[in-house]
Amino acid sequence: MAAKGKLATLVAELDARMENAALVSGQRLVEADLTQEFGISRALLREAFRHLAAEGAIEMVPNRGAEVRRLTKCEALELFEIRTELEVLAARRAASRMGTPGVAQVFEASVTPLLSGPQLSGAMEYISENEAFHRAIFVAAGNETLLDLARKLRLSQIMSQLRAAMTPEMLALSQREHRAVATAIRREDPAMAEAEIRQHLDRATQFVYQAPERMFRPEAERSAKDNGESAAKRPLFPGPQPKPTRVSSALRDQEEY
């Protein structure tokens, strides 16, 4: 039982570091450093790696070991497409629940420090605050399954991969959009909340689409890895996986445009 508790704690800590961008996409997880930091055995650490790999958070790379998963552009666009629809639902639910005792207070406590502070100093600060803002919407939605699905999509992990493309102007625009979303939710207006969050995430999807190819894992690597192992070893979600498509509908839409 003690070993299981240590494993769960270790997995949760590594997972949290990826969520708040303390560990970023493509970063190696050095066994020697982590075993020393946590005072644990390599066997326990490797078991934690297996759990995180099964969730699609990290991957085991030959001759390199564990590293935070790096996505192809197609994968990132597919995830944003799913995330948009989930968060539209979350924003509508959050707006409709502001009159529920305690919900508005928790929402305000979460988002006010994020939206009332000075302009963000850089991409890493933005990624952390962006994760906290979007999480507050899912928490206010009051649906644990929805919150868990959003966590599995790992928005901060995608954004950390693209941090070099983030400009001060882009960060300032995103903050303004966050304020507009929060205002709609505070006004208990589900339709407005949907419109604002969709506009925000559509622009974010465009940002992903326009990001330089060098920031993504090459599609050829994904195809080779998919041909060399079962999809269950590298899932986006635990459990049986659908066969990956070559191009997401989000990408097709952009190409048609």
Image: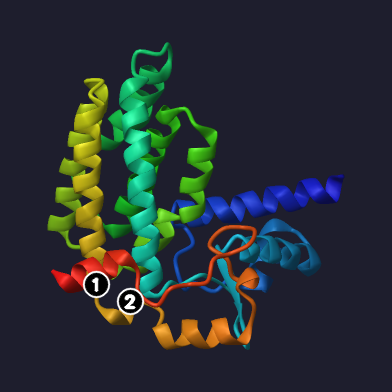
Amino acid, disc 2: Met
Question: Few, some or many C-alpha atoms within 10 Å of disc 2 (few <14, some 14-19, many ≥20)?
Answer: some
Q: Report which residue position mark 2 lands on.
A: 215
Q: Is residue 249 above or below residue 103?
A: below
Closer to the camera, 150 or 176?
150
Q: Residue furthest right?
A: 1
Colouring chosen for the image of the structure: rainbow
| Left or right of residue 190, residue 224 in this image | right
Which quarter of the image is occupied by the N terminus? top right
Does residue 96 lie above or below 170 as drawn? above
Query: What is the distance, in whole Å, between disc 1 and disc 2 at their CAs?
Result: 7 Å
Q: Which label is found at residue 154?
A: none
Is 93 located above or below residue 69 in the figure?
above
Residue 116 visible from this viewpoint: no
In the rendered structure, the answer to whether residue 214 lies left or right of residue 11 reads left
Q: Which mark is residue 211?
A: 1
Q: Where is residue 34? Give x, y as percent.
A: 65, 65
Asked if labels 2 and 1 touch by Cβ distance under 8 angstroms, the answer is: yes
Disc 2, SS: helix
Q: Residue at x 48, y 72 (%)?
A: 244
Q: Residues within 10 Å of mark 1 (few under 14, many from 20)?
A: some
Q: Quadrant of residue 42?
A: bottom right
Q: Given the image, on which type of amino acid does mark 1 rest?
A: Ala
Is 78 in front, or is 9?
78
Q: Quadrant of residue 135?
A: top left
Residue 23 showing in the rendered view: yes
Q: Callout 1: helix, strand or loop?
A: loop
In the picture provided, is 164 more to the left or to the right than 74? left
Residue 39 position in % (x across, y down): 74, 58
